Image (cartoon, coloured by chain):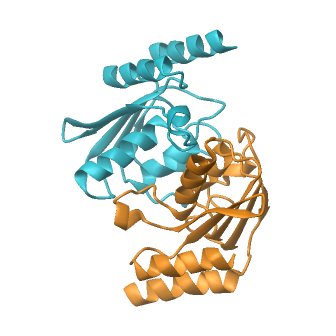
Chain colours: A cyan, B orange
Amino acid sequence: MQRALDQAQAAARRGEVPVGAVLVCDGAVIAADGNRVEQLNDPTAHAEMQVIRAAAAVLGRTRLEQCDLYVTLEPCPMCAAAIAHARLRRLYYGAYDPKGGGVEHGARVFARATCHHHPEIVGGLRESEASALLRDFFRQRR
Amino acid sequence: MQRALDQAQAAARRGEVPVGAVLVCDGAVIAADGNRVEQLNDPTAHAEMQVIRAAAAVLGRTRLEQCDLYVTLEPCPMCAAAIAHARLRRLYYGAYDPKGGGVEHGARVFARATCHHHPEIVGGLRESEASALLRDFFRQRR
């Protein structure tokens, strides 16, 4: 989770909403990245999407069954559904996101009967640090 | 919609689940592509994601407010949330997808109070052709 927080701080320095993610497979970090929506002009370039795509490319397969995702913010519905498509084993996340989240809030993607894959989920990991990063970023901006 | 159906047929010829999408901005086709999950080893490479990412790159912005998406299948929750992130104006889709869809089914992404953007939505456009493509593909595979 420290590496995900580092990625979130790096995203903030790039002027991106500070969210960072790390993808771990069999105990090894396969991909680590942050939000790059503005830099890449890509509305889908959330931190989770970045590391899922990178890990699938590295491993040469679309199903990442032995892989765990660490991300500093509760995934949005796009990222939650991508986690299901990629068949990730576990999802660890930091801050809860009542406005944009799609795991514990809003669309609750994994709670739907039609969701074809349910990772183990641990929320609130180093929550206060992850929240503080976001709060400080938006306070400076607004 | 014909061009989206053409893209779906091209996807089938590549061995991909046959879904095609076209992104139109101010009456001009900005991007057209099909599902490329297998070819790119990317679990997020659904047709809708491909054209949203391509259009954002072409237009040099992350918000595609004057743009309309045509896709042959009801978007999954990942793609529905990506449509919201990209602020697309209208979503036209073909076949309904009770198992994997996230618009009329399952997570119903746009129906959530926390969803920050709601495109106009027209479902069932050339539904029988779009459904037949998928049905024929899976019949040959299984």
Quarter residue B98 falls in: bottom right
Whether residue A40 is visible: yes
Query: With respect to residue B120, does A32 lie above or below?
Result: above
Residue B10: give x, y in percent of width and height. 49, 79
Of all residues, the one furthest to the right in this rendering is B120
Residue A58: give x, y in percent of width and height. 25, 49
Residue A43: give x, y in percent of width and height. 58, 42
Query: With respect to residue B42, does A69 lie above or below?
Result: above
Residue B117: give x, y in percent of width and height. 74, 44
Quarter residue B100 falls in: bottom right
| The N terminus of chain A lies in quadrant | top left
Say which of A99 and A22 sits in front: A22
Q: How many marks?
A: 0
Say which of B118 and B86 sits in front: B86
Say which of B135 and A105 sits in front: B135
Whether residue B77 is visible: no
Q: Residue at x 38, y 32 (%)?
A: A33
A115 to the left or right of B15: right
Query: With respect to residue A55, does A128 lie above or below?
Result: above
Query: With respect to residue B109, does A39 lie above or below?
Result: above
Q: Residue at x 65, y 51 (%)?
A: B83
B91 to the left or right of A13: right
Q: Residue at x 68, y 59 (%)?
A: B103
| The C terminus of chain A lies in quadrant | top right
Say which of A93 and A45 sits in front: A45
